[in-house]
Image (spheres, helix red, strand yellow):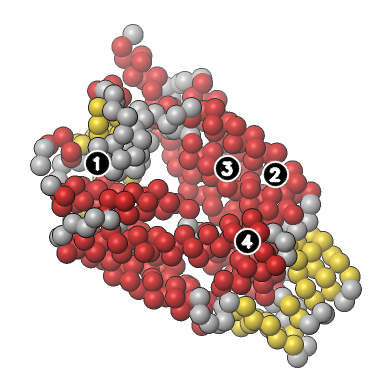
Amino acid sequence: MTTAAANNLASCHLCCKLSSASESHCSRCGAPLHVRKTNSLQRTLALLITANVLYVPANVFPIMITDQLGQSVPSTIIGGVVLLIQLGSIPVAAVIFIASVIVPLSKFLIMYYLVWAVANPRQAGLRQHTQVYRVTEFIGKWSMIDVFVVAILVALVHLGGIIEIRPGIAALSFAGVVITTMIAAESFDSRLLWDHLEAEKHD
Amino acid sequence: MPAMSERIACQGCDLLVDVGELQAPAQAHCPRCGHFLTRALNDGHMRALLYGISAAIFLTVANTFPFLTLEAQGLASSMTLPRTALELYVYGMPFLSALVGIFIILLPAVLVFLLIAVCLPLVRQRSAPWLKDCAHLFYLTQNWAMVEVFIIGVVVSLVKLANMADVTLGLSFWAYVGFSLCFTAGLSCLDRFQTWQAIERLQQ
């Protein structure tokens, strides 16, 4: 069992070709070559903090405003979930709650934990950590559901002055949360979790 | 072929794995961390090409006809797919409008175009000057399309509106569902490692 880095090889993130670690660009596809993603932990942390900051307006401000017969009713993300429960649509309320609340929050926690795990290497659980990272990376874009729902309602609901739906500022903040956490997950390099095994072999 | 090129460094843990010649259909996973490495399919590029062409047709239809129609108290309003993004611009959110448009229409359209541009030379076994650049862009942007997420968004919207009005699913909605299926299938047929190996063989 030996790694590419231990053999002085860098694997291209775009086309998987193995090149000498001293090359600056992949000879097959032209992408920049790095043995590990550049400044992985710093970038991941910076983007996570950005996402945390954006998460506040995303939940405090209305995600959409319903204008009905001259009355303006703003609703937040949580307000939307509560409304769906009152309407009796428990499964859909659950989908929104998972996509808009559980997924982003668990993504924050997991990514912070993984960054911590790289800084405090252990022998056990590496396989599970890598798998948790994969799931986190995959699941990120599903949080966009709520933003798309707002876009659809805004475009669809125009009933001659009786009822209109306008997008709220939280829709933009929440899209920002989803995108920054997606880039944060993409910036994290799970190979860093494994690197200390190689270093210990040489001690 | 030099034996070297059949080795893959796992993207999950950097382990060097010799996958040899995979006999299609077969998949390889990393023995250490379990991460997916590569997948060889029978006629993978031909299948990807056909899915790509179907997806292009579905997407064109999806952009042409009404997507959803709403009726309440004798009033009706309907929307098309591009309206979903454009209406946000009308309400003073140009940035969000651009993001939604990119995630659900523009990027998927570009990816289908790139998929066809990559598969066509590979199926015909004749290299093309655009092949590498198109493959490069394809693998760079692949993960950012949100076609399936949008469909779930439509379903949630239907439930939200159900007690207030009658909502009818238009032809475009079904075309977009068809697009989503072909798009996902096409993308999964274009394995990163196998495709780049094929491109390299073609250009030697």
Task: Establish whether labels 3 and 4 are both on one chain.
Answer: no
Q: Amino acid at mark 3?
A: Thr
**Would you name the residue on which mark 4 appears?**
B97
Relative to residue B82, is residue A27 drawn left or right? left
Q: Chain of mark 3?
A: A
Dot 1 crowding, Cα within 10 Å, few <14, some 14–19, many 20+: some
What is the secondary structure assignment of the residue under circle 2?
Answer: helix
In this view, the mark in front (3 or 4): 4
Q: Amino acid at mark 4?
A: Ser
N-terminal of the two: label 1 or label 3? 1
Which residue is pictured at 18% across the width and 56% down the height?
A: B127
Q: How many numbered marks are there?
A: 4
In this view, the mark in front (1 or 3): 1
Q: Is residue B47 above or below residue B191?
A: below
Residue most extreme to the bottom: B74
Q: CA distance from mark 1 to mark 3?
A: 30 Å
**Would you name the residue on which mark 1 appears?**
A28
